[in-house]
Each structure stands twice: as C-alpha cells, then as structure tokens.
Image: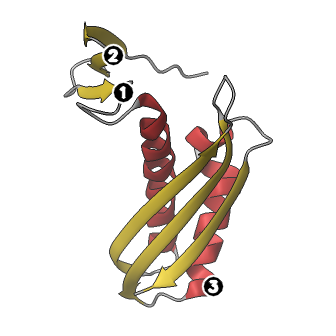
C-alpha cells in the first residue's frame, strides 16, 4: 500500500505554498487573487491525472499524439460545504492515427478505472466529457 505526502505553509491572508518534498512548490490562494484556488487545483489535478492516463493509453493504441488540451468545469453547491456536484471535461486532441473512438475509449478507461484523483472524489459527482479532434 502506497502513500502520498506534501507539506504546505501559510504565507499570508489566504495564500499558501506547498508541494511534494524536494520538488518545486505551488502557490494557492483561497481568494483566487494571488494564485489558483485549492478548489481550482482539484480540477487541475483531475485533468492532469486523466491526461496522463490518456497519453499512455493512446500510445498503446499506436496513436502519435501531437496535442492534448483540456478544459474542466466544476459545478458546486451553493451551501457549505461547497463541494462539486458535477465535473465536465472538454478534450481537444490531435495526432496521427487518432479518431474519436480511440479518444473516447482512452477517456472512459481513465475516468472509470485508472485516474486516482477522480476515483478519490465523492461517487455521486456527475462526470461528463466531450471530445474534439483537431
């Protein structure tokens, strides 16, 4: 069984800095003024995790990936805790040997089986996506 750990330090107001030991730290801001907010970083983490899976899966499908761009939008509750109720991914992909069927297969495998970040979220969050081949 593996573990993950980070260290985070308060800088001022709602600004924090942290990351994994020995690696560059990131800054986050609870007010979203000086940096990306922790909630936005959760979406970034989901996109990064899913993106890494998609790259690996498409490579196994012998797709020569040129670009993979992702936009992620999360819908949150109005009352506290203001957790996500839905997350929608928009994938824009290009490469040799690519088609929508392969991309959708890679996305489905990531979201349903492999992405640790998405699997760590509440199971009642609706996750959806669309794909554009560019």
Choose top left, top right, bottom left or bottom right for residue 106: bottom right
- Mark-to-mark CA distance, 1 and 3: 40 Å
Choose top left, top right, bottom left or bottom right for residue 100: bottom right
Describe the element under mark 3 as helix, strand or loop.
Answer: helix
Q: Mark 2 or 1 closer to N-term?
A: 2
Q: Residue furthest right?
A: 124
Q: Mark 3 or 2 closer to N-term?
A: 2
Residue located beneath label 3 in the image: 101
Whether residues under marks 3 and 2 lie with C-beta atoms below 8 angstroms apart, the answer is: no
In the picture, the quarter occupied by the N terminus is: top right
Side of 52 where 131 appears, left or right: right
Residue 41 point in image, percent of width and height: 42, 37
Residue 114 point in image, percent of width and height: 62, 50
Residue drawn at 32 percent across, 26 percent down:
29
Residue located beneath label 1 in the image: 31
Side of 15 where 74 appears, left or right: right
Whether residues under marks 2 and 1 lie with C-beta atoms below 8 angstroms apart, the answer is: yes
In the picture, the quarter occupied by the C terminus is: bottom left
Q: Nearer the viewer, residue 53 or 89?
A: 89
Q: Nearer the viewer, mark 1 or mark 3?
A: 1
Q: Is residue 73 above or below residue 105?
A: above
Describe the element under mark 1 as helix, strand or loop.
Answer: loop
**Which numbered marker is on residue 14?**
2
What's the image's color scheme?
Answer: secondary structure
Residue 38 point in image, percent of width and height: 43, 29
Q: Residues within 10 Å of mark 1 (few under 14, many from 20)?
A: few
Residue drawn at 43 percent across, 50 percent down:
48
Q: Residues within 10 Å of mark 3 (few under 14, many from 20)?
A: few
Q: Mark 1 or 3 closer to N-term?
A: 1
């Amino acid at each position: 069984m593996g573990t993950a750990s980070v260290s985070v330090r308060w800088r001022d107001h709602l600004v924090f800095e942290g990351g994994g030991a020995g690696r560059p730290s990131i800054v986050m801001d609870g007010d979203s003024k000086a940096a990306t907010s922790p909630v936005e970083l959760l979406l970034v983490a989901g996109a990064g995790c899913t993106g890494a899976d998609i790259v690996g899966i498409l490579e196994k499908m012998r797709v020569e990936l040129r670009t993979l761009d992702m936009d992620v939008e999360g819908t949150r509750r109005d009352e506290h805790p203001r957790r996500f109720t839905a997350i929608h991914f928009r994938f824009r992909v290009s490469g040799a040997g690519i088609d929508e069927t392969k991309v959708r297969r890679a996305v489905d495998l990531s979201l349903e089986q492999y992405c640790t970040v998405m699997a760590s979220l509440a199971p009642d969050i609706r996750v959806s996506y669309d794909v554009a081949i560019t």
